[in-house]
Amino acid sequence: MPDPPKLIITGYEFINLVKTKSWFASREIRYAPGDSILWDDLSRVMEEIKSDLKRTNLFTRIEIKPLIDFGEVNSVVFKIEVHENWFIFPGIVAELADRNFNVWWHDYHHSLERINLGVTLEHINLTGVRDNLDVKYQFGYTTRIGLKYHRPAWNNSTPFGFGVGYHYTEFKETPVENVDNKQVFVKNGNTPIFIKREYSGSVYYKYNKLIHLQMHLVHNHNSFLPEQAMKHPEFFLNGKTNQVFTQLNLNGQYSTIDHPLRPTQGWQYSVSLQQIGIPVFQEDVFTFLSQTLKTGKAIGKKFHSEHALFTKNGLTRHKVPYNLYKGLGYSASNVTAYELYVIDGLDYAYFNNQVRYNIGTVRWEFFKIFKNEPMLRVKTDIDLSFQANLAYVNDPFYFAKNNLVNTLLYSSGIGINFTVNELVEFNAFFSINHLKNTGLYFHTRRTF
């Protein structure tokens, strides 16, 4: 029986690239020149190439056409026409001091005094290799100075990248404990009571087309106002006024998912080992293991489902300072219908399920602002969605004051999502939780 016919991939031809380097775009595709594919798999391979490019967040439109050469050896070149995303985000910062919009609106009665102002400049593709430069100066309720640069690929001939950063933050008000799963804040007039300094460096390694490894090293130097440390000794533990530790994060990720915000196919597994403090040399030493499993699946042309499981476990089981003791309820871990609560613990698991119906996609084309930047285009995907969630937080230390820990949490909700340029998502959900609390909650998420 003859072997099934094959095609040899001889390369990729990109059309309409303005900023992104063609070698970097090719680097993100799981198939390299010289790879062979079965003729019958051509359609599937084209979908996988599109998924790989979509996952970079660099493009708002991707159209792929195979150019096949029938010769002594059958070969194919993929002609890929793209619309590049908008990469420059300068602006005025008007950022809430609170964990999310819902807390600011409901608990603090949308006080304008709790808004931080500032200026920011962010470029998410500075030299065309998805390298991110972020500069921020913020003042008001919280003073923040930030500078970071992350480059996932040094050049075309190495699988390594790097990142550096510095952040300085002054808090005039900070939470010092949780009571009834609500943060209790303290302040001392306009005097900063909690100051954070972070110096960071990162190394990225692309093991292959689908597996990425990262190492982040962060040195932290935090200080707490002495009179507040006496009143709230558990903030740094034992009434300390200074907290110095080095943090090492080792991350690995395998991903075939087509997009982190709105996945319609593929799956992604991430694992992170977080070591806080250097044993023997530093006082605060804690180890955490975090894992994430995400998947998306199209159900016909209009529907798709999304599922995500998040877990975090404390591998060291001793008491953690309050400022480092994080669970659910923060920007990256909001559980639908529990937005007004913080549910801190040493361990947690969160299972999110969502079904979306695509109402439609709206596109606008504007104009070219800078010569070496892509045209300003806006693409908005609009989805109706239904969510169902489960969560559990284990808190062995501070549970006496918080009744949402050490118990099963569950909720559901229906809402609408607006995903802009596949970079930022805005959504509104009407949700109900196991306490029969209902409400309309607003969120934003972004990929950069």
Image (spheres, rainbow, N blue to C red):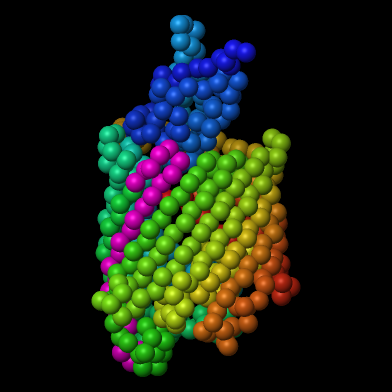
Give the mark count.
0
x, y percent for residue 430: 69, 61
Say which of 107 and 206 sits in front.
Answer: 206
Q: Position of residue 314 (x, y in %)?
A: 48, 72
Q: Residue furthest top?
A: 71
Task: Report the residue at 31% width, 89% height from top.
Answer: 226
Q: Residue furthest right?
A: 436
Q: Magenta region: which residues?
A: 205-229
Closer to us: 428 or 387: 387
Image position, residue 204 (x, y; %)? 33, 49
Task: Examine the rendering and report whether any part of residue 371 can be seen.
Answer: yes
Q: Main secondary structure of the magenta part?
A: strand
Q: Residue 177 vs residue 170: left or right?
A: right
Decide if residue 187 is in sight here: no
State the quadrant of the N terminus: top right
Task: Using the image, determine if residue 216 lies above or below residue 124.
Answer: below
Task: Pinpoint residue 115: horizontal percent, then vertical percent.
Answer: 44, 69
Q: Residue at x 46, y 71 (%)?
A: 315
The residue lying at 45 percent from left, 6 percent from top is 72
Q: Residue at x 45, y 41 (%)?
A: 210
